[in-house]
């Protein structure tokens, strides 16, 4: 099974404590790949920029409860005589309704469901956390039995203005404007700075390799008007999970093909089908290692197909991760992809082990990526995406 954060979503490690990130001055380093004049890699530690926008506070403890919560049944501390007299005097006064802040406590965790795939038992949980602006929010996470500390996919729920005493988070709607991790925001900001998602274009064809919970697909579907998104996912059960638990739907602007990614790309090349942007977020997560992309996409033949399936101004947005032994290193990924594109730039995430890689087919695009204008535009778009983080 592919992965992204597992297939097509951001990947992150679930932490149990609050995390704070420092602010540093960005450093830029240019590297050249071996062979011809192909240039690969402008290192920019974007993580140190994005973390200046706030600390992402996660829950400090896990309190497993059923999905339906009755706050009226919570235990209360004994009242003093003065408190009792005060309450008696205020009985005629209208009582203030409990707000979302009162009903939802950081650390609450609600198990929504589970799903057995060919490879693993998946769990879906809703968790109450504080976002970077210190606001209480509820996120839905997809976890696997064999790697419970790894978030395979994540989406955010829309908290009702008034949370009743009894509530069921599985009935809440999704916030499709939410991207869960920095490397996804970096990739999409870079794509926008390169003009991939230009709203003035009649139609933009996007391909995501690896679906996961479908957060990237649904983000593009609901935040743009001219992007048509195709996802290719090797595991049919992951498509069912995305539809059942993460609000993924297929319509005239987004659909999913169940197929091996390399085979699908080969068919696209054979038919002459081209994409303006390809988002490669296909990973494999086990107890021993986590690798993005999967080994199949380290192969030169597969990378050649990716390049051939892209339009002349096409852009590749790639999530790269290497944890554990026996997986392709960043240098290996950098080398093999540099052989098929005019230029690639990679961005380090200080708070994550992922690297965001952007590859272009035209040398003029790569020269533009080295300009201050590109960097300024990218940071501006990243900041806009981060406002909803």
Image (cartoon, helix red, strand yellow):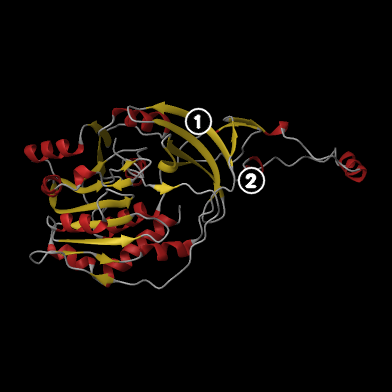
Residues 9 and 29: in front is: 29
Question: Viewer-proximal residue, 352 or 273?
Answer: 352
Q: Total of numbered circles in the picture?
A: 2
Q: Quadrant of residue 123?
A: top left
Q: How far across and down, in percent of the image, does residue 157 sit?
A: 49, 40
- Whether residue 284 sits left or right of residue 168 in the image: it is left
Q: Which residue was labeled with disc 2?
A: 101
- The residue drawn where x is 29% and y is 35% is 1
Specify few, some or many for label 2: CA neighbours under 10 Å numbering under 14, 14-19, or 20 or more.
few
Q: Relative to residue 37, is residue 306 depicted above or below?
A: above
Please tell me which residue is depicted at 7% across the width and 38% down the height of the picture: 270
Q: Secondary structure at mark 2?
A: helix
Q: Is residue 198 left or right of residue 38?
A: right
Please state the horizontal and vertical placement of residue 355, each as a whole percent of the image: 31, 56
Q: Nearer the viewer, mark 2 or mark 1?
A: 1
The image quarter containing residue 145 is top left
Observer-nearest residue: 186 or 119?
A: 119
| Label 1: element kind | strand
Q: Residues within 10 Å of mark 1 (few under 14, many from 20)?
A: some
Residue 204 in the image, given as x and y percentages of width and height:
22, 46
Q: Please report the residue visible at 30 percent of the width from the left and 43 percent of the height from the top.
A: 283
Q: CA distance from mark 2 to mark 1?
A: 21 Å
Rendering coords of residue 20 (x, y %)? 52, 60
| Residue at the disc numbered 1 | 112
């Amino acid at each position: 099974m592919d992965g992204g954060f597992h297939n097509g979503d951001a990947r992150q490690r679930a932490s149990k404590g609050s995390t704070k990130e420092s602010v540093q001055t960005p450093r830029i380093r240019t590297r050249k790949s071996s062979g011809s004049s192909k240039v690969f890699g402008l290192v920019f530690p974007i993580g140190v920029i994005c973390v200046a926008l706030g600390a992402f506070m996660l829950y400090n403890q896990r309190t497993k409860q059923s999905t339906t919560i009755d706050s009226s049944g919570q235990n209360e501390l004994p009242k003093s005589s003065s408190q009792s007299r005060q309450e008696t005097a205020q009985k005629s006064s209208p009582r203030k309704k409990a707000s979302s802040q009162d009903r939802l406590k950081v650390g609450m965790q609600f198990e929504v469901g589970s799903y057995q795939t060919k490879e693993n038992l998946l769990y879906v949980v809703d968790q109450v956390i504080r976002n970077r602006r210190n606001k209480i929010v509820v996120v839905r996470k997809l976890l696997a039995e064999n790697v419970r500390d790894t978030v395979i996919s994540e989406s955010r729920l829309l908290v009702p203005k008034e949370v009743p005493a009894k509530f069921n988070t599985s009935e809440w709607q999704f916030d499709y404007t939410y991207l869960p991790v920095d490397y996804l925001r970096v990739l999409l900001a870079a794509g926008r700075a390169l003009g991939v998602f230009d709203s003035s274009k009649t139609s933009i064809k996007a391909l995501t390799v690896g679906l996961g919970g479908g957060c990237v697909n649904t983000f593009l579907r609901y935040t743009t008007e001219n992007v048509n998104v195709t996802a290719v996912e090797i595991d049919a059960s992951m498509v069912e999970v995305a539809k059942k638990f993460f609000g993924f739907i297929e319509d005239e602007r987004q659909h999913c093909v169940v197929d091996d990614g390399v085979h699908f790309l080969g068919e696209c090349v054979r038919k002459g089908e081209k994409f303006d942007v390809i988002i490669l977020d296909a990973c494999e997560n086990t107890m021993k290692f986590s690798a993005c992309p999967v080994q199949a996409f380290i192969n030169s033949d597969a990378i050649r197909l990716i390049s051939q399936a892209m339009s002349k101004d096409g852009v590749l947005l790639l999530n790269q991760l290497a944890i554990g032994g026996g997986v392709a290193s960043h240098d290996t990924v950098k080398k093999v992809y540099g052989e098929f594109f005019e230029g690639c730039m990679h961005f380090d995430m200080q708070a994550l082990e992922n690297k965001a890689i952007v590859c272009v087919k035209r040398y003029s695009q790569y020269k533009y990526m080295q300009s201050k204008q590109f960097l300024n535009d990218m940071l501006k778009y990243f900041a806009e995406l981060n406002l909803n983080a």
